Amino acid sequence: MTTVASFNIDYLQYLTPNGELVGDKKPAIATDFEQLKSIYELMVLTRTFDAKAVALQRTGKLGTYASCLGHEAVHIGIGSAMAEQDVFAPMYREYGAQFYRGVKMSEVLLYWGGDERGSNFSGPKHDFPWCVPIATQCTHAAGAALTFKLRGEKRAAVSVVGDGGSSKGDFLEAINAASAFQLPMVMMIVNNQWAISVPRKKQSQGRTLAQKGIAGGLPSIQVDGNDYIAVYTAVKAALKRAYEGKGASVIEAITYRLSDHTTADDASRYRPTDEVENARQFEPIKRMRKYLTSQGQWNEQLENQLLNTCKIEVEAAVEEYLNASKLTVDDMFDYMYDELPHNLAEQKAYARAMEEKSNG
Amino acid sequence: MAKVTMVEAVTMALAHELEHDKDVVVLGEDVGINGGVFRATNGLAQRFGEDRVIDTPLAEAMIAGMTVGMATQGMKPVAEAQFMGFIFPMFEHIVCHAARMRNRTRGRLTCPLVIRAPYGGGIHAPEHHSESIEAMFAHTPGLKVVIPSSPSRAYGLLLAAIRSPDPVLFFEPKRVYHLNKEEVEDDGEEYPLDMCFVIREGSDVTLVTWGAMMKETLEAADKLAEQGISAEVIDVATISPLDMDTIHESVAKTGRCVIVQEAPKHCSLSSEIAANLADQGLYDLLAPVKRVTGYDTIMPLFKLEKKYMPTVDRILDKVNQVLEVS
């Protein structure tokens, strides 16, 4: 018997949980402190926003909300590595990536507050909206990538799934399509260990999830998803390959969902609290702060200023959300088709009339 | 002007749009060099190149998902589901994404795509190749669902479907792909997607149908004419959104209506038309609305398919029932 092919999965980490920089070749981003400080500020803003959104749900001012607690490094790593003209195909909790790209905090709140206007992003108009059916965004990203390839545009598509999403057909079909068409695409797996209550090990006996990309012949690696520098570097390199016409890549980012799945979930039903407490020592914001502090780039005063600014910014976003103009029954009908068909026009007129009647 | 079959008219429309709109691409399984299993894309890859007429990996969800992705980024993809029976993996993308994209992004992203699928029974095909599930799509808000019944309407409606800024499901009745030849001018003239077509005028009874059942319905109308009964025949063509005005107008004239469909009866397009007639046209009716449909059984394998599908006799039976009421 001979070996016809063999594979390995590399693991990339630059920042240890103690905030120490490791590795032989350090990327330029590792010492670009102005950029790292602004990234750190966005990470803290995202976390401040996240805590506020959960609080809004608890007080009845927001619908079910999917928290991003603990995912700040991986999400902002993705968002900051992408160019504006690239297209982002998120699942539904990648707010850090979206904030970097220009989506407003008030838009996230509108969406989870039950208002379609939230998906009419201020950010890149070509980005896909949140995608609740798991993994279907991967084939959408493949379609976007094929468009860029056919048009000869130097753009790429970036999709995100979780560890649960990596079990789905659309994820695997997108890997296959990315391979068959050699698409300018980066497929992220944000492995946060839990798909609601189902742990990572029940999704697959495979040693890694990244190796699913190997099946499609795509370069596939694991990165420390709590290490911003590693995520950014890996995504940047994968995008470079994509722009150069060398095809797609798969990146599995290892992180941990420190929150419940959504505000409708109670994770204490299925996972021990000491596991969560243990995971906190690896979380991304503490690690980045330790690194910046050790490099003389950060201190307590800056931290306090930042927390204050974030609070003010989030409060402003909440105000904007709460003061959004009221939806009318017309909003159900007006975006169904380019031109409202006659049967819908009749239903709209009826809905309006009933509305006027009930308003006296 | 060329005389063409329905499947040739489909090819003609695809070629016309590929020629005139650089954003149009055709994709699917075997649509390239092979020209599609029914030859609907015959010669297109050779003429327009493999970047415009794209053979995909064998994965229907992927085809639909990529079609959605392409449409949101400014392309006008025309995907082929090789048979309607293979459309189910595409269903999630059609219902959860294509149909909703404009609404959920407040018009920021749209989905100007077409998914074509040959459908219906009567060609002795294997299992999963003969069903008629158009109602499942007509039930979904945000889609347009179009079914041609002649070469000229296949050409004009497919042009309109490709040019539509909204997603269109275009179901081709494969039993009549090669049935008749018709003169179709390749003039790029589209047909409207918001109306039914009165194919034959009459005064005694309205026969409403779409797709391959047009054949049996017209034969029934001929037989009725021999008996001195004048049947008006309507091709619904665009089953969603449904143009009830044309049907109401006809029934106001004839007072009698029989709806003919190959699909099962329960929760079908004929249910919707009958309900609309009861709601808005009751006082025009001189007799109850009758329906000639497939049975509410699994579409049988081909030994029994002729027993399943409506025949001229079954149509005449229902027409006689509505004529008996005076």
Image: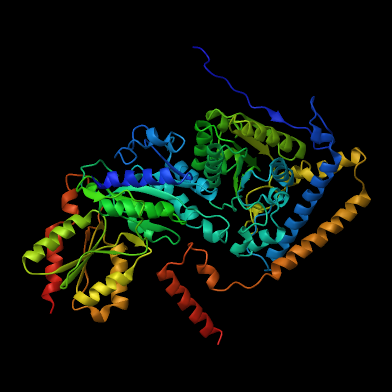
On screen, residue A252 versus residue A3, left or right, reads right
Residue under the image location 69 percent in, 29 percent down: A11
On screen, residue B256 versus residue A7, left or right, reads left
Residue under the image location 45 percent in, 50 percent down: B113
Q: How many marks?
A: 0
On-image quarter of the C terminus of chain B: bottom left
Residue under the image location 74 percent in, 65 percent down: A318
Q: Nearer the viewer, residue B42 or A105?
A: B42
Q: Is residue B4 visible?
A: no
Q: Nearer the viewer, residue A95 or B155?
A: B155
Residue A269 location (% of width, % of height): 63, 53
Single out the residue that lies furthest toward the top: A1
Residue under the image location 74 percent in, 40 percent down: A226
The colour scheme used here is rainbow
Q: Nearer the viewer, residue B37 or A22?
A: B37
On screen, residue A170 versus residue B135, left or right, reads right
Q: Quadrant of residue A64?
A: bottom right
Residue A163 location (% of width, % of height): 60, 41
Looking at the picture, does residue B127 appear above or below residue A330?
Answer: above
Q: Nearer the viewer, residue B31 or B123?
A: B31
Looking at the picture, does residue B287 appear above or below residue A300?
Answer: below
Residue B2 location (% of width, % of height): 25, 45
Residue A229 location (% of width, % of height): 77, 37
Q: Is residue B8 visible?
A: yes
Single out the residue that lies furthest toward the bottom: A360
